[in-house]
Amino acid sequence: MNRIFAAALCAAVLSPAAALAADTYEILGKDGKKIGDVTLTEAPTGVLIDIEVQPGGLTAGKHGLHFHETADCSDVGQYKKSGAHAGHAEGKHGLLNPNGPEPGDLPNLIALPDGSAQAGLFTNLIKLDALKDQNGSALIIHADKDDHVSQPIGKAGDRVACAAIK
């Protein structure tokens, strides 16, 4: 075995990040136009989530953020075709709920006064292969903050943005 091939093989085996999958998806706003991107990276015990929303993409303040069960953002402005929260049958909604959380529950996303947002989040409630199953899934951003307790969506309000995850 030549030295260059052996060095490349060792680097691939010793570098865990080299084996982890990462995919980027467009986030569509209320009008169906792109307002940002979400990158999902497979981690050994969950999913790393990097979100970037452009200025003007959201209203300032906290927004509920959830994974939904279907990769369908075709009903622009409503985003109801994305279905219920991913894994909604596995628990009650809410990161603070004593009978929860559901696998699709995530912390709130905070938009700045200019409507932009950036977040680096991690969830160990769901794996990337579950998000990219036969139906895919969707990352949904809601109009209001999630109180992480109320049923069924933490009083998070309308769905204002959607990213189809396939």
Image (cartoon, rainbow, N blue to C red):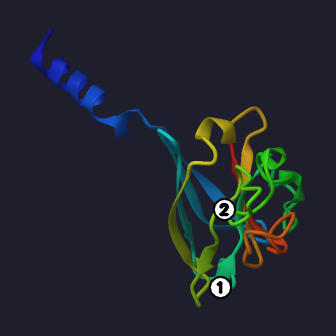
Position above or below: 143 against 32 = below
Q: Which residue lies furthest to the left in this view?
A: 3
At 65% across and 61% down in the image, what residue appears?
Answer: 106
Q: Is mark 1 in CB contact (under 8 Å) with mark 2?
A: no
Q: Position of residue 157 (x, y in %)?
A: 84, 75
- Expressed as whole percent of the image width and height from the top left, the position of residue 116 reads 57, 79
- Give the residue drawn at x 12%, y 13%: 2
User: Which is nearer the N-term, disc 1 or disc 2?
Assistant: 2
Checking the image for residue 146, the label placed there is none
**Label 1 residue SS:** strand
Q: Marks 1/2: CA distance? A: 18 Å
Image height of 24 relative to 57, above or below = above
The foreground one among 142 and 108 is: 108
Label 2 is placed on what type of residue? Ile
Image: 141 above or below 25: below
Looking at the picture, which amino acid does disc 1 mark?
Gly
Quadrant of the rendered structure where residue 139 is? bottom right
Decide if residue 4 is on the left or right side of residue 130: left
User: In the image, is 56 to the left or to the right of 30?
Assistant: left
Q: In which quarter of the image is the N terminus?
A: top left
State how many labels appear.
2
Q: In which quarter of the image is residue 100?
A: bottom right
Q: Name the residue under label 2.
A: 27
The secondary element bearing badge 2 is classed as strand
Q: In the figure, residue 29 lies in which quadrant?
A: bottom right
Of labels 1 and 2, the one closer to you: 1
The answer to which of 95 and 155 lies nearer the viewer is 95
Seen at 72% across and 56% down, the residue is 101
Asked whether, in this view, residue 127 is left or right of residue 64, the answer is: left
Which numbered tag is attached to residue 61? Answer: 1
